[in-house]
Image: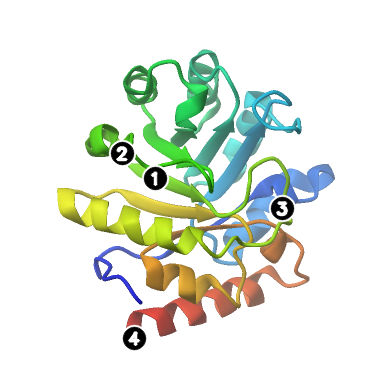
């Protein structure tokens, strides 16, 4: 089963720097943008909400001068409100968070927008979509996790395709532009199916940064996305 997508909206590829070489991070983000990336995806883990500890606003501020594409910050932290202003100041363009990490979802969405960033809401594989009944009109992005968050390099969970289809129907029903992003196990051989389910933005970490030729991998992904449009 495929889901109709707004043909005017482009497909966007967002390499996750979680899989980049941190000893050469400035060079890595420049290289992946030169290879055709549309967005830089920035995973923030706190060793509390998820069992890992990664990077914070100082790293975001450090890479901001190296790229002009949007920086998409995914906050896997709890509580979330305290750190929003720090990432906005560091140069984030999009800030997304998990509903269970916020005491008041509406307040967090408003806080992100007040700081000049686009707000997004993130759903783990087992998290229900019910809060979208109220929150979706306020969002610029919905991120569906197709793995359980906390570690890179995991395998795509197939049933998340049904969640993607559900969110695509919800977005189409409200008639406004909301990015539908998918993160976890995205690679050349499944990106077409993910697009066919309704996604338009694709986070890929090890599939891109683990490849020897970034441009070749991104080109191969775009070729599969083109097939998804024509099918």
Give the colour scheme shown: rainbow
The kind of secondary structure element at disc 2 is helix
How far from the left and from the top, in percent, is residue 97? 48, 32
Per the model, the C-alpha gap separating discs 3 and 4 is: 33 Å
Per the model, the C-alpha gap separating discs 2 and 3 is: 35 Å
Please give the name of the residue rendered at 46% of the width and 20% of the height, measured from the top-left corner: 102
Indicate the quadrant where residue 198 lies. Answer: bottom left
Q: Are the residues flagged by discs 3 and 4 in contact, CB closer than 8 Å?
A: no
Mark nearer the N terminus (4 vs 1): 1
Label 3 CA crowd tier, 10 Å (few <14, some 14–19, many 20+)? some
Q: Which quarter of the figure is the C terminus placed in?
A: bottom left
Which residue occupies the extreme top position in the image?
A: 82
Visible residue check, residue 11? yes
Please give the name of the residue rendered at 64% of the width and 42% of the height, measured from the top-left corner: 149
Mark nearer the N terminus (1 vs 3): 3
Mark nearer the N terminus (1 vs 2): 2
Q: Number of marks in the image?
A: 4
Indicate the quadrant where residue 200 lies. Answer: bottom left
Mark nearer the N terminus (2 vs 3): 3
Is 72 left, or right, of 151 in this rendering? left
Say which mark, if any, is on residue 230: 4
The kind of secondary structure element at disc 3 is helix
How far from the left and from the top, in percent, is residue 38? 49, 57
Is 119 located above or below residue 225 in the figure? Answer: above
Mark nearer the N terminus (3 vs 4): 3
Say which mark, if any, is on residue 28: 3
Is 83 located above or below residue 174 in the figure? Answer: above
Is 170 located above or below residue 222 in the figure? Answer: above
Label 2 CA crowd tier, 10 Å (few <14, some 14–19, many 20+)? some
How far from the left and from the top, in percent, is residue 175? 15, 51
The kind of secondary structure element at disc 1 is strand
Is 216 left, or right, of 52 in this rendering? left
């Amino acid at each position: 089963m495929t889901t109709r997508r707004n043909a005017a909206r482009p497909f966007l590829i967002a390499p996750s720097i979680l899989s980049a070489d941190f000893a050469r991070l400035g060079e890595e983000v420049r290289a992946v943008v030169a290879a055709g990336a549309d967005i830089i995806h920035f995973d923030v883990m706190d060793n509390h909400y998820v069992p890992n500890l990664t990077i914070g606003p100082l790293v975001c501020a450090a890479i901001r001068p190296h790229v002009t594409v949007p920086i998409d910050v995914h906050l896997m932290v709890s509580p979330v409100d305290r750190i929003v202003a720090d990432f906005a100041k560091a140069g984030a363009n999009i800030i997304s968070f998990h509903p269970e990490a916020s005491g008041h979802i509406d307040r967090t969405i408003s806080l992100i927008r007040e700081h000049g960033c686009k707000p997004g809401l993130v759903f783990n594989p087992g998290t229900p979509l019910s809060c979208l009944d109220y929150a979706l009109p306020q969002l610029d992005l919905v991120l569906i996790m197709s793995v359980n968050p906390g570690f890179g390099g995991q395998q795509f969970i197939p049933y998340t395709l049904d969640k993607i289809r559900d969110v695509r129907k919800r977005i189409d029903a409200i008639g406004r532009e909301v990015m539908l992003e998918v993160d976890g196990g995205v690679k050349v051989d499944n990106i077409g199916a993910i697009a066919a389910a309704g996604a338009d933005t694709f986070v890929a970490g090890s599939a891109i940064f683990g490849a020897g030729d970034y441009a070749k991998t991104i080109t191969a992904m775009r070729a599969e996305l083109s097939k998804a449009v024509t099918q």
